Amino acid sequence: MNRKTVSSRFFTGLKSLVLVAVSMAVSWPLSLSAQDANVASQLPSIKSKKASESLLQDIIRNGDRLVAVGERGHIIYSDNNGKSWQQADVPTRAMLTAVYFVSAEKGWAVGYDGLVLNTADGGKTWAIQLDGLKFTRKRMADTIPALEDKIKSLQKDKAAAEEQLAEAEANGEEDLTPYEDLVADLDDHLSTLEGELDDAKASLSNTVANPLMDVWFRDADNGFVVGAFGEFLKTEDGGATWESVAGSLDNEDRHHLNAVAGLGNLMYIAGESGYIYRSDDGGDTWSLLQSPDPENGSFFAVNIISPDEVLVSGLRGAMYRSGDRGNSWKQIPEDLHKNMNSVYFAGNDTVLAVGNDGAFLRSRDGGRTFLSHVRKNRLTIASVVEAADGNYILVGSGGVQIVVPESL
């Protein structure tokens, strides 16, 4: 329904905008403890006349309404193409990173502290639907008994293997390698599980949760959020309950997941180290695609053009397009080499790409080639949409900016 930019604002790739976001949302005043910071993030967002001038991380057009989210829990909306803005009632002061709507009324926003917010009135008022800290603690607590059982079982297996090794030595067997390898393998596995158990127990006293970077809903019931350190959650009841599905991805090193996009049952996730995943069955199973840029960094946005065409963009101006569902890629030339934070399809083969240091690119051929512009203020741009009047609405470190297409 929505021509929504799917983008990421996090420290993957050290984007300049994100460093500002991290400093504002995580590096609290020295007088505050981490626990104090978490409590503060749960306080209602303070109303400010300058909310539209503050750091904003994402914007979406929902019908004729524009909705943007950003620092200090700011959510603002405009019904006159961005000329004036109203601030929504929001129950958090945490940094918000992404917003998505499935109808004129129902929408979701995600952000730091693992927060998921929802609205049922088009973005005027919001409620916390998922408290990431509580969710993380419960999830870790639930894993502890199973981990303890596995460790006890492995300890028995290791003891039995050591007895077999000792018996083989006593019997004078010449080749002890199979016994030694078995003991070593069991010891490695045991060490891994013990580390996981220590992490799970430590998480029970954590005062922060992984930031969530992006959100996408197929319909009013089925939705997905992705985030830092491989965080990947889904809901099948409109967000009333959530479950971690991080295990469905080939992501052993817990690379940051920066963007998620979907078209029916076709879905993509893009993230750190050039990782790109595709699902053809609505997110039940995922394939790790061969990355077009595994060495140069991370992708911050993924956009589905058509059932066969997909575009990714990210670190140092990297932009790649695929015409075969991500099985092969072709690089899109660009000359600014700035981190590209967001790509937006405006229709009629017009594609906009925005990024750090005022980077603003426009394509008239469906994203195959771009002409580069640099905003005079050189403020980093996080996201862009086209308003109902045809003007482009930018948000980023300078708040809201309106660009008349004819001025480019």
Image (cartoon, helix red, strand yellow):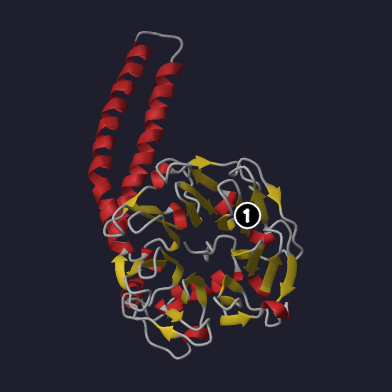
Left or right of 327? Residue 199 is left
- Which residue is the site of mark 1? 297
Task: Tell me the amino acid under the disc marked 1.
Answer: Gly
Quadrant of the rendering where the C terminus is positioned: bottom right
Give SS at disc 1. Answer: loop
Q: Is 56 left or right of 368, judged from the image as shown?
A: left
Nearer the observer, 290 or 230:
290
Residue 168, position as x, y percentages in the image: 36, 12
Instruction: Give whichever of 145, 348 is nearer the camera.
Output: 348
Vertical side of 385 occupied by 165: above or below: above
Disc 1: CA contacts within 10 A as few (<14), some (14-19) or many (>=20):
some
**At x 63% / y 69%, what residue is drawn?**
355
Quarter-of-image position of residue 15:
bottom right
Q: Position of residue 95 (x, y in %)?
A: 43, 73
Q: Residue at x 29, y 26 (%)?
A: 157
Q: Residue at x 53, y 81 (%)?
A: 81
